[in-house]
Amino acid sequence: FIPVTSTSLTRCVRQAQTMPPASQPSRWPARLLALMLGLGLGLVGAEAGLRFEDHLAGRSSDSWLPHLHRDFSAAMYLPHPYLGMVPRPGFRSKASAGGPGYRYDLNAFGLRGPETTLEKPAGVRRIVCLGGSTTFCTGARSNDQTWPAGVQALLTGSRRLRAPVEVLNAGVPGYSTAESLINLSLRMLDFAPDVVLIYHAPNDMRLAQAEGFRSDYSHGRRPWAIPEAPPIDGWLTRHWRLYARLQARLAGHPEPYKAPAMQELVFAPDLGARAVPASREVVAAGQAAYRRNLKSLVAVARMGGAQPVLQTFAFVHGMDREEGSDLSAAMDQVNQTIREVAAELDLPLIDIAGPLSDRRELFDDWMHYNPRGCGEHAKLVARGLLESGLL
């Protein structure tokens, strides 16, 4: 028994008041851990959900990559400092490996056709075919169905030839006379052609029939540059769907990406919106630029020791309007220009438009041939070359 006095009680109270309170265990580490765990589980769940959604839709992480992040190492085209783009040497389309679609097999020089050499073999007459997709022949399911390949086959089988012939397909989808002029000057003359076949019109008229027309075609073309993403950004985008979706939204593209055609990277994006219907007006400045470019192609070919040969252009009247274009009147004027230039410069002219225009069974659309159309075109060219005496 300890007696309690007022003095001792007071002393105890004072001691209790001056003693530090008993320390309590902090709850913040536990709360922070729970928050991080919940956030981690949420991110894992979101990532799993997005991957499952992409799996059901048949998408990969590439479906969410902006084109700035896309890998163009296997694309059909390469950027070029003067031409905008050139076909990739040695390219093989998916169909070449047994996949769906058309077989586009390019040789070591980026030409659609069999391998060749830069140096012309002795005794061989070389023919270079210039043009856009209608010379490349996008509607031909394989190389041997293109009209340049058909010309090669028909001439090789002819008894009227004095020497072997090699036909090179230098057509590139999207090219106009402006690109072909550079292509001929800087690249195709190196093959020492004896004959240069020119088949151009639609891509020029697409540029000619546009508001703000400039004779150097700069109103409808743009440089092609592919900025490279930082490695960490590319890695995160490819391995983390949530990050890829966020990147897509920040770039203003919340939907899955569709790989752009390479031509779209060199055409001005608003070119179609600035189209001037040819039924309303055929732009005279555009026609004049085409005439100038055509005559320049002739001059460069002759300077390189080759004989230029012009061809009128076959298409289906009215079908262009059905497909959203309105170029028929401009195309008619182009064909008249081709005839006038051939007469003025004393050039061989092969009429393609007369026999083949408006025969819808030969076309995939208003200007691109199907394989049958390519075959008919080849017959006209082979006959015209044989009759000209150039071979």
Image: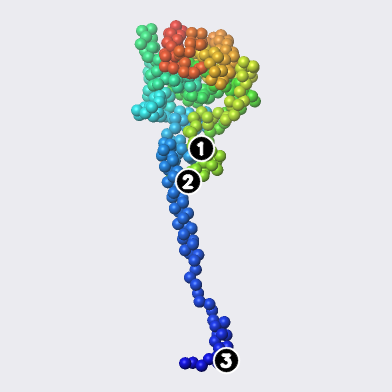
Judge by depth and name the residue closer to the eye, 348 or 15.
15
Q: How far separated are the C-alphas under marks 1 and 2?
A: 13 Å
Mark 3 closeness class: few <14, some 14–19, many ≥20 residues within 10 Å: few
Which three-letter amino acid code belongs to the residue tagged 1? Glu
Mark 2 vs 3, N-terminal side: 3
Residue beneath the point at 50% across and 74% down: 23
Which circle marks residue 242 in the picture? Answer: 2
Residue at which label 3 appears: 7
Q: Is residue 154 visible to the viewer in this orientation of the structure?
A: yes
**Label 3 vs label 1, nearer the camera:** 3
Residue at which label 1 appears: 255
Q: How far separated are the C-alphas under marks 3 and 1?
A: 83 Å
Residue beneath the point at 40% across and 24% down: 102
Mark 3 vs 1, N-terminal side: 3
Which circle marks residue 324 in the picture? Answer: none
Mark 2 closeness class: few <14, some 14–19, many ≥20 residues within 10 Å: many
Q: How far separated are the C-alphas under marks 2 and 3?
A: 72 Å
Mark 1 closeness class: few <14, some 14–19, many ≥20 residues within 10 Å: few
Callouts 2 and 3 close, C-beta under 8 Å: no
The spot of residue 27 in percent (x, y) is 49, 66
Instruction: Please tell me whether mark 3 sits on a helix, a strand or a loop.
Output: helix
Up/down of 67 relative to 31, above or below: above
Mark 1 vs 2, N-terminal side: 2
Judge by depth and name the residue closer to the eye, 161 or 211.
211
Instruction: Please tell me whether mark 2 sits on a helix, a strand or a loop.
Output: helix
Which three-letter amino acid code belongs to the residue tagged 2? Leu
Which three-letter amino acid code belongs to the residue tagged 3? Thr
Please give left or right for residue 115 compared with residue 33 in the image.
left
Up/down of 267 relative to 192, above or below: below
Q: Is residue 350 visible to the viewer in this orientation of the structure?
A: no
Please give left or right for residue 229 compared with residue 99 in the image.
right
Residue beneath the point at 54% across and 87% down: 12
